[in-house]
């Protein structure tokens, strides 16, 4: 009796695929998600990295170095800028 290799390969692929699909559906009932555990872990790590980068960027962008090399909050800088613009508008209206 001879073994037909292409048929054995195709049968193995279908059996393996069926096993993985059944396994995913059964684990889905326990975990309530269709994603693999390693994928969920990687996505959680990526979210933490992005959040940390966004927080550090937001903290550093709120501070500006003024002409005397002193750290200055952007709120102070914005309020002084707005006062200057308001005074220029008052001068041009008169």
Image: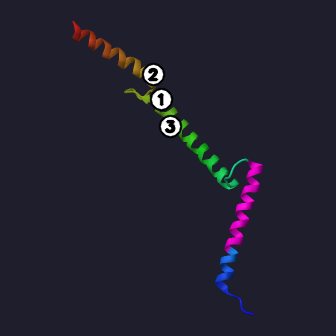
Residue 18, numbered label: none
Residue denoted by label 1? 62
* First reached walking from the N terminus: tag 2 or tag 3: 3
Give the secondary structure at mark 2: helix
Q: Residues within 10 Å of mark 2 (few under 14, many from 20)?
A: few
12 is higher (above) or lower (below) than 33: below
| Residue 24 % position (x, y) | 72, 58
* First reached walking from the N terminus: tag 2 or tag 1: 1
Residue 57, numbered label: 3
Classify residue 10 by image quadrant. bottom right
Q: Spot the residue most to the top.
A: 94
Q: Which residues are magenta?
A: 13-31
| Residues marked 2 and 1 touching at CB (< 8 Å) | yes
| Residue 54 % position (x, y) | 53, 38
Q: Residues within 10 Å of mark 1 (few under 14, many from 20)?
A: few
Residue denoted by label 2? 75
17 is higher (above) or lower (below) than 90: below
Q: Nearer the viewer, residue 4 or 33?
A: 4
Pick the quarter of the image with the C terminus.
Answer: top left
Task: Tell me the CA gap for discs 1 and 3.
Answer: 9 Å
Task: Tell me the CA gap for discs 2 and 1.
Answer: 8 Å
Q: Is residue 86 magenta?
A: no
37 is higher (above) or lower (below) than 12: above
* First reached walking from the N terminus: tag 1 or tag 3: 3
Classify residue 91 by image quadrant. top left
2 is higher (above) or lower (below) than 92: below
Give the secondary structure at mark 1: loop
Pick the quarter of the image with the N terminus.
Answer: bottom right
Classify residue 39 by image quadrant. bottom right
């Amino acid at each position: 009796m001879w073994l037909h290799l292409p048929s054995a390969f195709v049968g193995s692929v279908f059996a393996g695929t069926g096993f993985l699909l059944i396994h995913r559906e059964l684990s889905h009932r326990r975990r309530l998600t269709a994603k693999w555990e390693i994928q969920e872990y990687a996505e959680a790590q990526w979210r933490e990295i992005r959040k940390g980068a966004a927080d550090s960027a937001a903290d550093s962008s709120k501070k500006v170095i003024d002409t005397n090399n002193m750290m200055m909050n952007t709120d102070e800088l914005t309020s002084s800028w707005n006062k200057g613009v308001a005074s220029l508008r008052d001068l041009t209206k008169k």
